[in-house]
Image (cartoon, helix red, strand yellow):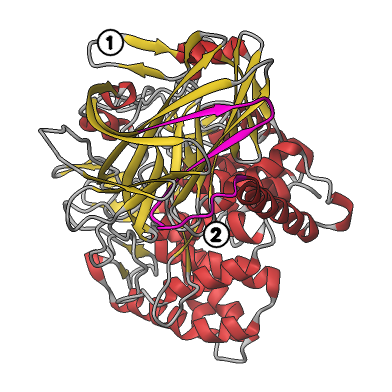
Amino acid sequence: MCMEFGREICGNLETAESREWLVTNGIGGYASGTVAGLLTRRYHGLLVAALQPPLGRTLLLAKLDEIVTYNSCFYPLNTNRWSDGIVSPHGYRHIERFTLSGTVPVWRFAVADAVLEKRVWMQQGANTTYVQYTLSRATQPLQLTLKAMVNYRDYHGDTQSNGWQMSLETVEKGICITAYPSATPFYLVSDSGNVSLVHNWYYGFDLAVERYRGLSDTEDHLHAATLEVTLNPGESLTFVASTEKQPNLQGETALKLRQTHEQKLIAIAKAHQPLDSQELPPWIEQLILAADQFIVDRPLPEEPNGKTIIAGYHWFSDWGRDTMISLPGLTISTGRIEIARSILRTFAKYVNQGMLPNRFPDAGEEPEYNTVDATLWYFEAVRAYYSATKDDHLLAELFGVLVEIIDCHCRGTRYNIHLDPADGLLYAGVAGVQLTWMDAKVGDWVVTPRIGKPVEVNALWYNALRTMANFARQLGKPHQEYQAMADRVLARFSRFWHDGLGYCYDVIDSPDGDDLSLRPNQIFAVSLPESPLTPTQQKSVVEICGRILLTSHGLRSLSPDHPQYQGKYGGGQYQRDGAYHQGTVWGWLIGAFVQAHLRVYNNPQQARQFLEPMANHLTAHGVGSLSEIFDGEPPMNPRGCIAQAWTVAEVLRTWLATSG
């Protein structure tokens, strides 16, 4: 799918800066910015390197300011907004066309009768970004000047220069930058042109989206070097930013490697589809490429080829919950079975006290285990993998870990997670800790504590027990205990049902009693392979979620009728996190709704219609990918991460599930 914008988008700063692009390198690093070329986030940059893959993400090259001299006329192609609100220069006005070719963003700048094309991509497996300029049309030579704006900071931070002196050293075909003695050196090199060292700080880049998010909104970047080159018609310049001392400077070869990688992804996915559906719609092919951006290396001593999933760009690392929810759609649906296998084996190494880690901190500290549902989603990920592969060898390898998880939940583990002997349901929670996917917390304020027996946790528990019984049978091991436990959950799950309202309590047995808030969590009691609800109850849940929670891009996290409902997401952290699960729409929930709708109505064509708005969304926010969240009120503007793993995964998974 080749998405294309003309001057009607590119020449309007408001629309051009609201559309962002993303390229990744498969080890946690990325490059990202706006179609306008304007920095609007602290997370934007041409090289955000993963110095401790998949984490340790560090901004190295913030941007290139391009200036063209053609036919004795001067044309700035770059765009900057400064802390006083002034936009200067207005280079976006020269963008004649922007396209996304695969995942490679391409700008077409038109000045007089000349056209200069710019492409950005990354090398797979390396902290290396390519920026290629091609003079595709001209009647005379064109002089191109590039000002390299660099930095060296954690990608969550911001820089106020305060006299910071970086070490700049000329090397063959470019420069080496060492921000301070213990910093990782990085290199800016090119295949042609003349490079001169500068070391001049530019102050007060305005970051408009950070201001909207209630965070510090100005930053300084160092103009480290200037590259000047003359291009004749048809000639190209390849500029490379890398932590590698001698990166490949052959731009065409490097671009071909990127294109071949993406073509291979599409071919694998097509080969994995049923014979009668190997022609995939262009927007689904685009999602297959988007899916690859989240899959990154997490090597372990005993698993050097270990893999994991980045939850979202720009600011998330790999989260256990997001990884397990995303795994079926990102890997199994796309035919990347070996990666699914690697991820399942990698995370098995981290199981502790019967729990999967919720988060791997950016700074490399010990994993955090504050989650009740990530571990239960692991069972569903293993089930989906086994259903697709019948891999008895891996099942036998993981079975002991799965047994340990069930045993620990029965005995009790962290955060008061335990099996209630009175009804066989799972209880979880202690004051001050957020354990479910509705996990917003500001300071000591847990916005949605959900202490007690959450509905989706117990739907997952039931699904896990049935899954374990089936696994035990397959391996010739005793299964009766798991079957009996599941039967008990099935018998007592009726405690969640409210006959008068026709839907499930969100949480029962909480310190404040049973919670009747209408939330989307109950949809999993219908969408999971093993449902503890009766067919009549399943239909009622789908109908009420469809009437009250469903939007074009997902389900609201709370009914608009609830007094705590918030339909707009924005402001400082207190305001944003206060709205995060109190009405904000979550894109990934569209998958569970579609799966539940398919189960109740058995109408694949109708179920698939709920996914169609996502095809249009590919041209907004994170171009070529799907957003994390949306406002609960029309026009449901996209918010949060521009590219979210479980949103992409669930749309892919359920599109294929409705292909019959």
> Is residue 119 placed above or below 74 in the rendered structure?
below
Quarter of the N terminus within the rendering: top right
Identify the residue under disc 2.
Answer: 327
Q: Is residue 140 magenta?
A: no
Where is 531 relative to 648, above or below? below
Q: Which mark is residue 584?
A: none
Judge whether residue 109 can be spotted in this image: yes
Kind of residue sitting beneath label 2: Leu
Q: Is residue 365 above or below residue 190?
A: below
Mark 2, residues whose alpha carbon is within 10 Å: few (<14), some, or many (≥20)? Answer: many
Residue indicated by mark 1:
85
Residue 232 is one of the magenta-drawn residues = yes
For the residue pair 255 and 344, the one nearer the viewer reads as: 255
Q: Position of residue 576 (x, y in %)?
A: 29, 30
Q: Secondary structure at mark 2?
A: helix
Q: Quadrant of residue 476?
A: bottom right
Query: Mark 2 vs mark 1: which is more N-terminal?
Result: 1
Q: Secondary structure at mark 1?
A: loop
The answer to whether residue 581 is seen in the rendering is: no
Amino acid type for the residue under numbered disc 1 = Gly
Disc 1 residue crowd, few under 14, some 14–19, many 20+, Cα 10 Å: few
**Above or below for 284 versus 79:** below
Question: Residue 57's x, y, as percent?
Answer: 33, 51
Total numbered badges shown on the rendered structure: 2
Q: Residue at x 60, y 41 (%)?
A: 103
Magenta extent = 226-251
